[in-house]
Image (tube, rainbow, N blue to C red):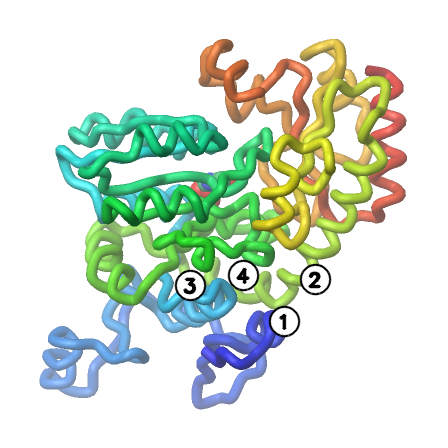
């Protein structure tokens, strides 16, 4: 990793390993295993494998390693381990650290599957989990205890785009020696400053902006080398959450255009949020860099830009929201995000359907709420499509 390079250069060149053929594009090493010249060489590699010595694709693979180094370079992390999906990354980051009897403090507003790991799986294995309102400093202060082992949060929450004061939470966690694990998908790796603000471990679903073109699942855990190699790697290499070399290649190609795509999507999201703000058919427009956002000042401090996501609350509840969704011509109804295609989601009936009505209400997931992932289409076309759809609300 060349630290002196700026982001766009790193995104194109970091981590590259060329074979004897001198290929320009990263090669896909679609191999499960690796051969050794001699029995002694096999023995030596099992004792200690060097940087470019591989044993088995569940432990590591050259194409996957290229991707890990490229994203570690972008994030400013010492090391990374790529996984089969974002959830494999979240699960491994938590399970590799925790054991029965440990205490975790987590923000309540979480991606559904993250909530399942914390609320159902960890609890079944004897881990105690305390949930807090991520935006309330006093809540964190009251919940973090001397024996708290892990603090978990999504830096920008889904779907209500709440901003968590990561610096404040990290300081509280570090005062008791807890590890701060941040799921950073919504902030995007381009605008992320999670490690700088105090996170110890950063997790991404690379399915989102990093692929960014709706093809492959993937995930990654980033952090200090000691953590990645001594704590995370043993867990992952024996439980089998490895990223496929083919998917790593797709992610590598996605990284090349990541900065361009995220910035273009963010410019359009900012345009839409500004234009929709105050619309008569909307009770609310949520976008971190809109002055009306409850944490506007914090959002400006921790994020260079407002990001690629916004949420709108359509007056008239679910029926009106469904009419808007069904009237859209460019936006596709799906539940992914960070894609080249603009995507709209109705959280209350899909991603957050499993939650009780009370929990949804406490998280601000109203029946009229529509989450919008802004893609790469023309911003004028997107706005026109939203405006015509809102007419029928
Ligand atoms: C999508 C997502 C995940 C899960 O990622 P997968 O790649 O679908 O497993 C976890 N956290 C957040 C915030 C996400 O958006």
Of marks 4 and 1, which one's residue comes earlier in the chain? 1
Question: Residue at 42% of width from left, 39% of height from top?
Answer: 153
Disc number for residue 260: 2
Name the secondary structure under disc 1.
Answer: helix
Residue holding disc 1? 8
Instruction: State how far apart marks 4 and 1 are (Cα).
Output: 17 Å
Q: Residues within 10 Å of mark 1 (few under 14, many from 20)?
A: some
313 or 13: nearer the viewer:
313
Q: Which residue is mark 4?
A: 250
Residue on which disc 3 sits: 245
Nearest to viewer (mark 4 / mark 1): 1
Badge 3: residue crowd in 10 Å (few <14, some 14–19, many ≥20): many
* Distance from the alpha carbon under mark 4 to that under mark 3: 9 Å
Front: mark 3 or 1: 1
At 40% from the left edge and 29% from the top edge, which residue is drawn? 138
Q: Secondary structure at mark 3?
A: helix
Q: CA distance from mark 3 to mark 1?
A: 23 Å
Q: Are marks 2 and 1 in contact (CB under 8 Å)?
A: yes
Front label number (4 vs 2): 2
Which residue corresponds to the image point at 81% horizontal and 43% vertical from the top-left? Answer: 271
Secondary element at tag 4: helix
Q: Quadrant of the N terminus?
A: bottom left
Depth check, front residue: 257 or 367: 367
Looking at the image, is mark 2 or mark 1 earlier in the sequence? 1
**For the residues bearing labels 4 and 1, Cβ distance under 8 angstroms:** no
Q: Is residue 245 left or right of residue 304?
A: left
Disc 2, SS: helix
Vertical comparison of 235 with 373: above or below: below
């Amino acid at each position: 990793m060349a630290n002196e390079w700026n982001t766009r250069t790193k995104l194109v060149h970091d981590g590259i390993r060329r074979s004897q053929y001198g290929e320009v594009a990263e090669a896909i090493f679609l191999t499960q295993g690796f051969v050794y010249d001699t029995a002694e060489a096999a023995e030596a590699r099992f004792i200690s494998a060097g940087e470019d010595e591989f044993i088995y694709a569940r432990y590591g693979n050259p194409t996957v390693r290229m991707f890990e180094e490229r994203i570690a370079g972008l994030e400013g992390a010492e090391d990374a381990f790529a996984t089969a999906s974002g959830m494999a990354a979240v699960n491994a980051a938590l399970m590799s650290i925790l054991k029965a009897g440990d205490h975790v403090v987590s923000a309540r507003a979480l991606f559904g599957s993250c909530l399942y790991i914390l609320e159902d799986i960890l609890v079944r294995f004897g881990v105690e989990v305390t949930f807090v309102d991520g935006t309330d400093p006093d809540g964190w202060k009251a919940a973090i205890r001397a024996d708290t082992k892990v603090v978990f949060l999504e830096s920008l929450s889904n779907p209500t785009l709440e901003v968590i004061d990561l610096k404040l939470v990290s300081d509280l966690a570090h005062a008791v020696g807890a590890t701060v694990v941040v799921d950073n998908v919504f902030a995007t790796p381009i605008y992320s400053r999670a490690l700088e603000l105090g996170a110890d471990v950063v997790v991404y679903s690379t399915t989102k902006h990093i692929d960014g073109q709706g093809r492959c699942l993937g995930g990654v855990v980033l952090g200090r080398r000691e953590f990645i190699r001594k704590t995370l790697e043993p867990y992952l290499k024996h439980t089998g959450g490895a990223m496929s070399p083919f998917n790593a290649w797709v992610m590598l190609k996605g990284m090349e255009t990541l900065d361009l795509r995220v910035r273009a999507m963010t410019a359009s999201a900012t345009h839409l949020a500004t234009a929709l703000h105050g619309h008569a058919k909307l009770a609310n427009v949520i976008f971190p860099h809109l002055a009306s956002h409850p944490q506007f000042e914090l959002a400006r401090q921790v994020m260079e830009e407002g990001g690629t996501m916004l949420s709108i609350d359509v007056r008239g509840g679910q029926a009106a929201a469904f009419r808007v969704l069904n009237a859209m011509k460019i936006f596709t109804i799906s539940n992914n995000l960070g894609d080249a295609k603009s995507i709209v989601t109705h959280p209350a009936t899909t991603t957050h359907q499993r939650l009780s009505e009370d929990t949804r209400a406490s998280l601000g997931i109203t029946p009229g709420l529509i989450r919008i992932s802004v893609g790469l289409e023309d911003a004028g076309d997107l706005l026109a499509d939203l405006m015509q759809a809102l007419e029928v609300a």
